[in-house]
Amino acid sequence: MDNLIEPRLLKGFRDSLPKTELEKAKLIRTLEETFQLFGFVPIDTPALEYSEILLGKAGGETEKQVYRFFDHGKRDVALRYDLTVPFARFMASHRSELYLPFKRYHIAKVWRGENTQRGRYREFFQCDFDIVGIDSASADFEILLLMVASMQALGIDNFLVRFSHRGVFNRLLTKLGLTARSVEILRIVDKILKIGERQVEKQLSSLAGKEEIRSILNFITPGKDSAETLKNIVKESGEDNEDTQRLADITSLVQEVSLDETILLDPSITRGLDYYTGAVFETFLLDQPDLGSVCSGGRYNNLTSLYTKERMPGVGSSIGLDRLHTAIRQMESDEHEITKAVLVLCLTEEYLGYYHRLAGSFREAGFQSEVFPEKRKLARQFQYAEMKGIPFAVICGEEERRRDRITLKDLRNRESYEELTVEQTIQELRKLLPDS
Amino acid sequence: MDNLIEPRLLKGFRDSLPKTELEKAKLIRTLEETFQLFGFVPIDTPALEYSEILLGKAGGETEKQVYRFFDHGKRDVALRYDLTVPFARFMASHRSELYLPFKRYHIAKVWRGENTQRGRYREFFQCDFDIVGIDSASADFEILLLMVASMQALGIDNFLVRFSHRGVFNRLLTKLGLTARSVEILRIVDKILKIGERQVEKQLSSLAGKEEIRSILNFITPGKDSAETLKNIVKESGEDNEDTQRLADITSLVQEVSLDETILLDPSITRGLDYYTGAVFETFLLDQPDLGSVCSGGRYNNLTSLYTKERMPGVGSSIGLDRLHTAIRQMESDEHEITKAVLVLCLTEEYLGYYHRLAGSFREAGFQSEVFPEKRKLARQFQYAEMKGIPFAVICGEEERRRDRITLKDLRNRESYEELTVEQTIQELRKLLPDS
């Protein structure tokens, strides 16, 4: 027993303590309920898959970050690094058991051996929701609607969802003869909210001429509303086409449900290097602009192309759970939620059976309740309640037990309510916690 | 695109389809709520840890099953194979941030490269709840109470929780001079419910003499109630001692909360090769005896001995989620739960905005609702609803739209309700789904 092992964690990994776990669970539960209201259903896939499956399409950067190894059977396996690739494999595996359009959500851990110096974690949650098997404006719009509903369900009011279309940007670049440099240009334009128009102009100057840059900047500058922006996009990118038509359809659906102040057409949204081919989406919290997008996504041409010849178009979005958790924690730091909990103190171990019966009565009335499991100094038992955030204690010593009465103590203000029956205690608790 | 990758899974791994995921989520949510009612709080730990941490105490068999490899930084890492070892490391890491007794639950995936021929999976959920930092009868009892409450919360009525104490069995073996063979003997006795007394007697015959075997069989045979069983245990194992005293304390607490028909003292319970040192627990569903124990646990001396010198006694139990899920599915196969869901059909894409507004109204009234995202034959749209288990469709064509009326169709019996306003539709839905 002398050779103790140091209880250390791997760099980039972390434990989750009860407070964080409870907050996260609440956040996830709210999102799940919202997804289900829109007819989305949950799936899960294994954490571990054949490397061939997970890395089929990945480039060098991704491949370097993936946890990959040979298992007991000398199989080349890897831990999933996102939820999109496993979803593609899932759709190819279960095509015959599923109806289309298939609307799924998936909230689960993924692993990436990223450089932790940038404050990144190597294990984190992703939360994806997608509609696959259909290419329609209504599906694009439904994802936007669900992005809005998710923010609202989490109590976030001051946010904007921005959308655009990869195709129209590509058409502009084709018109300007800049297709060969589209990757670099998209990457620069994508940063406009962070670095500003001036910087974008400067960084573009090595890739395009003055005229072209002006055209790009005109294109990405939103008008006073989505309708004006749309007109401008059509003008700059050349003419009406199926991509601008899709933007027009989405814009009109947004107007019809009166969300045109929350969901905005913004042609500067490009989603950088992502694999999107159609509409693209981002979500910004206006009170915390530095956070970046907390929910992003878009439309892709063909999810399952690596595994099957059947074409599977889709559209979806992904919530940055950790980012959102941080944001919500900041917002809620003032409000202090009171746990509906009661600690039954242990004054004598002879009464433990009675104490457990008391705790059972409080639980039946909807309160969390537990018995301190052995006789200790009262100060020690109160300290336990305080550290655990339990606002109420119930005390019953010999004298009271004989009269079948208990004392309720509100630990928030040290006030005592004496000589109560169990029923009176529950009534008193309900008065003191108006929500219960 | 011609070189398609076969979308196969690793042996022993499985996808979870929506029906299963929804059932599992419901099961887990019910358990979480029950744990919280008893003052237990959730934690999480990384899936990946240093092999040294996870394998510190493990024997050869465990070590062979663990997914272990070198990561990018040449660190020797492994995927957790249970939730107990990470919990021990967690307690050592966070001792200063936590109050004792600490009551936690942890529901998460673990991975073992087990032989899949025995029907085992290599990725599965564990669900553990423990009270650490205290060695008291009240804590042992609270775990038993929570085992009962968990079963009841899941709608399981016909079950028995059995408990005993490792120490008293060891005392008996010491008295009989059989300590050296205790591992083999415990393993045989543990199988008594499966193989019967006669087989146990036979298998023991190579390890002990006739007298000793009779004494063991006397010891493990329960009396007509826990009190009689307790008397018998004291007699066979020699005399009153702290272990029989603990059993007496637990038995009396069980009686005081009137659970003596649900929680039974049964000295044949030994938990085979597990690391328990005190009380041990098992749970059997009486309607499905072949399933084995669905919730087992016990008391251990010192959880954190590998990592710290501070002694950390604990008691806990673990629910076999997959096993329980199977059991519940069997029980509920008759009841068919109706989803509160409405599909808004798409008769013309011009009305998509209106259809989405309708779906929004149904969601506000508490129904899951979605719009079929493009115009297709009605038969195709009805088929979608049927495959997804959506019981209601809402239909609105040109004529009805002009009069601001809609048709509600109950897809369970093909009955139609025509010329309804949105409010009337919601009222009708509430009538048709009495719970909503």
Image (tube, coloured by chain):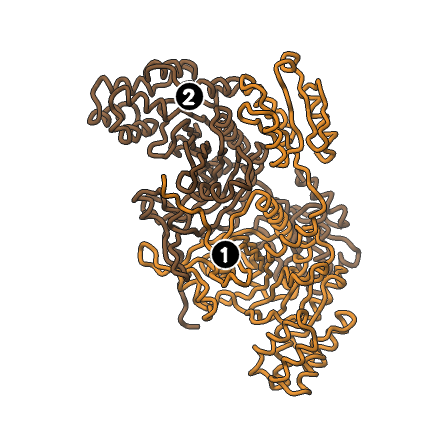
Chain colours: A brown, B orange
Residues A376 and A174: in front is A174
- Residue B315 vs residue A394, the one in the foreground: B315
| Chain letter for the residue marked with disc 1 in the picture | B
Whether pointer 1 and pointer 2 mark residues with C-beta atoms closer than 8 Å, the reply is no
Vertical arrangement, residue B182 with respect to residue B77, above or below: below
Marks 1, 2: nearer the viewer = 1
**Is residue B404 at least partly visible in the picture?**
yes
Q: Kindly identify the residue that appears in the image at 33 percent across and 23 percent down.
A: A169
How much space separates mark 1 and mark 2, taking CA atoms?
A: 47 Å
Quarter in which the N terminus of chain A is drawn: bottom left
- Pinpoint residue B285: horizontal percent, then vertical percent: 69, 59
Q: Position of residue A218 (x, y in %)?
A: 31, 17
Secondary structure of the residue carrying tag 2 is strand
User: What percent of the width, then of the height, locates residue B335?
Assistant: 71, 44
Question: Which residue type does callout 2 highlight?
Answer: Leu
Q: Is residue A101 left or right of residue A246?
A: right
Image spot of residue A231 (x, y percent) = 39, 13
Residue flagged by tag 1: what amino acid is it? Gly
Residue that label 2 marks: A265
For the C terminus of chain A, give its image quadrant: top right
Neighbours of disc 2 within 10 Å: few (<14), some (14-19), many (20+) = many
Q: Farthest residue to the top: give it.
A: B402
* Res. A411 in view: no
Q: Label 1 neighbourhood size at 10 Å, few (<14), some (14-19), many (20+)? A: some
Answer above or below: position of A359 versus B349: below
Mark 1: which secondary structure? loop
Q: Which residue is mark 1?
A: B12
Label placed on residue B268: none
**Quarter holding residue B2:** top left
Q: Is residue B225 above or below residue A13?
A: below
